[in-house]
Every structure is written in structure tokens, then in C-alpha cells.
Amino acid sequence: MAQRKIIYGDSVSYRHMCRFESGFFFQQPLMLNYEWYWRVEPSIELFCDINYDTFKYMADNKKKYSFVLSLYEYVETIPTLWESTKKFMKKYPEHIVEGNSMGFLSDDGGDTYNHCHMWSNFEIGNLNWLRSQAYTDFFNVLDQDGGFFYERWGDAPVHSIAAGLLLKKEEIHFFNDIAYYHVPFTHCPTGEKTRLDLKCHCNPKDNFDWKGYSCTSRYFEINGLEKPEGYENQQD
């Protein structure tokens, strides 16, 4: 992988991190008293005021997973991830919920993976969902196949596939009003009024949401959501 210049391709520590974030952080003793988490990475930027309790919003609206950026995963890092996912779906059909987000993950009803995922360096989620039997069974199938090490599976596609299959569409939330930067992508809220109300200092021209390599349009389309006013001006 290093010779092929795949990002973090020769890093063992990165593999341990992805596996830990996929299957273990929510089981740590320090986390067991909590129901919600917000993942915060070093060197990020938050460009707007956040004037409400995001955890209360998630709980009140029955959301279990959320994101601000989505994109296509590096194909070279996950060549057999979807085969392992299909093995899980066949073994545990009872965990695949009706009204899921398969349309976000696949263009052909689940035969192949389109590589869309929600970027997990920002995520607000429900810890009880990650501790559920459904998610535990999903992670264990993947872990036994060894792709975290033999390939370079990231926790972002793992979390996204799990959310896409194990949660109803309406249990996943896109935080348009939380502006965020993690190299090299920016989420700057779409809609001038939104940016003014939240005193944002990001440049809307930098917004990645509606560019060709983003999967956020797909999220809006499969959920039947109206895209924010002005999104057309931020497309490629």
C-alpha cells in the first residue's frame, strides 16, 4: 500500500485507531455513564455559533447518528468491506431495518457499494445504539474477516454502513448549521440567512457539500428533503 501511495497505507497505528473507533471506544469504562458522544478531532475549525444543545436536539428528535461532511471512500482501502457487509446481512437479516438508507450506500439495491460515507472525524451519536446487539454483531463479522489490518478499513465507512442499514433514514441527521473544517474539506452552512444568524465566518465558496465528490446531495435525495436555498451556487 505504501508503494501504491495509499493514504496511511503502511501505518499500523492508523489501523488500530480505525478498529478502536469502530468497535471499542464506546465500551471504555469512562464512557459507560454516557448516552451521547461528540467526536472532536485536533486541528479542526468550527466557524459558526452553536446556540443550542446538540445532544438534546438529537434526543428530542429521535436521531441516533449525525454528520456534516460526506464523500466517497478511497476504493483501495476497502476492497472487500462490502463483501463482509453482505455476509453480515445474510447472517443477521433481523438487524436490517425497514426504511433504511441503502439508497445512500448502493446504486443497485445492495449488490455493490458506491463508497459513499459520512466523515466520522465529526459525528454526534447515540452510544446505546453502538452498544446494541445489532451493531455488535455487525462489528464482530467485520473484525473476524480481518479487513481492518489486511486492508485498511476506516471507521467512517464502517459507521456509515452500520447507520445506513441498522437505522431508519429519519434517525440520521445532517447538521447544516454546524460549520466545520477538517483538512482538506469545509462544511460552510448553505443559506445566507443561516450564516448571518449564526455569525459564521466561513467562506461559502469553500463549502464542499454540493461538489461532485460529496455524497450529501444523495442524502437529501433519498430522504426526500429540500436542499437549502442557494445550494445551486455552490456546485462544481
Image (cartoon, helix red, strand yellow):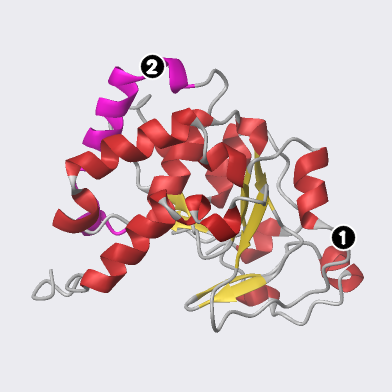
Q: Which of marks 2 and 1 precedes in the sequence?
A: 1
> Image quadrant of residue 38?
bottom right
**Residue for badge 2:** 93
The picture places residue 105, in percent across and down from the top left corner, at 42, 38
User: Who's the residue at 70% across and 39% down the image?
Assistant: 63
In this view, 194 is above or below 49: above
Q: Which mark is residue 52?
A: 1
The picture places residue 83, in percent across and down from the top left corner, at 22, 34
Q: Please name the amino acid that badge 2 sits on.
A: Pro
User: Who's the residue at 84% across and 64% down the image?
Assistant: 194
Q: Please name the amino acid that badge 1 sits on.
A: Tyr
Residue 104 appearing in the image: no
Count numbered badges in the picture.
2
- Left or right placement of residue 95 versus residue 235 in this view: left
Query: Which quadrant of the figure contains the N terminus?
Result: bottom left
Q: Residue 93 in magenta?
A: yes
User: In front: 36, or 6?
Assistant: 36
Q: Main secondary structure of the magenta part?
A: helix
Q: CA distance from mark 1 to mark 2?
A: 38 Å
In this view, 221 is above or below 33: above
User: In front: 212, or 11?
Assistant: 11
Q: Which residues are magenta?
A: 72-96
- Left or right placement of residue 66 versus residue 1 in this view: right
Give the residue furthest to the left. Answer: 3
